[in-house]
Image: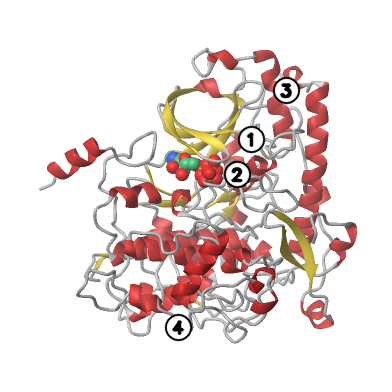
Amino acid sequence: MSNATKSRVEDSETSNLEYAVEAPSKKKRKFSPIVWDREEKEARVVSKDRVLPSVPLPSLYPSPHRSDVASDADVSKVDIFEPENLSQGTALSTAEAAVADGLVGICQSKNPADLSPSPLLREQYDKTHVQMEEEVLVEARNISMSRWASDSDSPRDMSDDECTPNRQHSSPESGEFRREDSVGGRTRTFASDEEGSFLGSGSGGKYSENDLTDKSMVIDENDGENVVISQVESDSEYDDRFPMEEPTVSSQRQINMLQGCRSVFEYEKLNKINEGTYGVVYKAKDKKTGEIVALKKVKMDIDRDGDGFPMSSLREINILLSLNHPSIVGVKEVVMGDLDSIFMVMEYMEYDLKGLMEAMNQPFSIGEVKWLMLQLLEGIECLHGNWVLHRDLKTSNILLNKEGELKICDFGLSRQYGSPLKPYTPLVVTLWYRAPEILLGARQYSTAIDMWSVGCIMAEMVAKEPLFRGKTEVDQLDKIFKTLGTPNETVWPGFSKLPGAKAKFVRQPFNTLRKKFPAASFTGSPVLSDLGFDLLSKLLTYDPEKRITVEDALNHDWFREAPLPKTDFKPSFPELNSQKRYLTADSLRNFYSNKP
Ligand SMILES: Nc1ncnc2c1ncn2[C@@H]1O[C@H](COP(=O)(O)OP(=O)(O)OP(=O)(O)O)[C@@H](O)[C@H]1O
């Protein structure tokens, strides 16, 4: 369990405990680029142990902490890892093409001569490179022109927030400090049991140059899948408040073509964990250190239009290498296999939330749900604070380890600006956590889409079953409307103008969510206090502009009422079945028969 997350504490006037109190923030809210200012919370108590960031994405720069992991490419390529595919002569060239496209500096080679790309790979690199350049430019421009762009509001003051973007040029001093330093001096970490007693203290597919001259960023989604950046808001008031800055990306971007990756043969493959849309995940052991890791093999046959390294994978790697947060799965390095294989080496997590819930015979307790929610929200706060939308939050993308630490994984769909999304199979990309604005074909959406997913995940953790299990998009909307009531212009201004709103949906005048989660129950239905229900309702709010932000969710009083977050929660299941991430009948039987 990470100290950072464990020690998140919120202020409460009703509490007689002392907490570290952060002064009311002067910053504008910094969540959705298309959702405007709201009242700020008066005060928020935060952890004394949190490691805080200093700089935003986009970062094509590797972590200084991570580049040292891969220092020896001159390794023997023992033929134990997919030997049939081994082609030493071309491997480095492939890796180089990938490296040059953003895996910059995460690998090193002792022999630069090995790294000259073949003409074919050179061409692939050039194509992908141009696309990356455009995206990076747009992303950076938008960040600098956002409402955070003033001195006090810039994402560069992410030191006020929760995560540490890894950048080659950032010094540890500037990148990290403890929140307790900032204000007040009153700090306390906490742990609780279930009863609440404290146990411890302490637009259309392409963007143009013109797009770069506007003031704020939104994301367009065309035809359901093609996501691009477009620009909104150009009023003078905005200009006054948030003066434009020139992008600095071109001077920041540095590609070291002479750096290469370590080989996957440094690892001993143990077994396949799972196969998702974008890659196969293996459990493996570092031969030198014995450390157990997860290796995600990047699929090369999708999402690349036949001409390069998959953009989804590059983005995922870039994001994961750029962010360092206890609730975001850590990537140790990127290694290369054969001509067409690149692997991400990640910290190994024993469970994913989906598999775990399938294996449990009881739902989580409310204290456990709170603890998991806090960790999840903190990871999302880090993402949103760095202009990253996850866009595919679901229970199988939330990993847990034996220590009860939760980490978000699978950033394959994150920040897919300008690149079509091509799910390998529609069955895999679930609709269940998808926000109504996306289902209804909204062309602009924001961080609120992730918050909807969090609402679905919260409900699922409480009830131990998915909240809305639609089979098609229309079915998904029907299921949502049946429970939350059919939206209208009153609850969701702008709803009727959404492309999908013309369809005939169920007419449900009432919100019946409370019935599913009563405050007290004699029927065995999951129970949620008024505060818990309030948070859930705010997460599952139709209007994205009114939907709760991650910061407000983290400040919600539900986390301060008993039972408190169960910070000492540790999943007590044996490690999940390696193939499917859920327990075999045998291991379950053994598990329960051995229980006292
Ligand atoms: N670091 C890890 N440790 C252990 N298991 C992991 C790790 N990363 C991923 N997994 C397992 O592999 C599965 C697939 O991983 P991931 O979601 O990253 O792949 P994907 O191809 O992007 O999947 P999707 O189809 O959901 O987009 C996860 O649901 C999880 O069970």
How far is disc 3 from disc 2 in space, using C-alphas? 21 Å
Separation (CA) of disc 1 from disc 3: 15 Å
Q: Secondary structure at mark 2?
A: helix
Residue closer to the observer: 102 or 490: 490
Q: Position of residue 582 (x, y in %)?
A: 34, 42
Q: Earlier in the sequence, mark 1 or mark 3?
A: 3
Q: Are marks 2 and 1 in contact (CB under 8 Å)?
A: yes
* Lower sequence index among marks 3 and 2: 3
- N-terminal-most mark, 2 or 4: 2
Residue 493 x/y as whole percent: 64, 82
**Residue 106 - label:** 1
Q: Is residue 25 left or right of residue 152?
A: left
Label 1 crowd bin: few (<14), some (14–19), many (20+), radius 10 Å: many
- Disc nearer the start of the sequence (2/1): 1
In the image, the residue with mark 3 has its CB under 8 Å from the nearest atom of ligand 1:
no
Q: Which residue is mark 3?
A: 93
Mark yes or no: residue 144 visible: yes
Q: Nearer the viewer, mark 2 or mark 4?
A: 4
Q: Nearer the viewer, mark 3 or mark 4?
A: 4
Q: Residues within 10 Å of mark 2 (few under 14, many from 20)?
A: many
User: What's the residue type where badge 4 is placed?
Assistant: Phe
Please give the name of the residue rendered at 76% of the width and 17% of the height, measured from the top-left corner.
113
Q: Can you identify the residue that label 4 sits on?
A: 510
Inter-mark Cα distance, 4 to 1: 53 Å
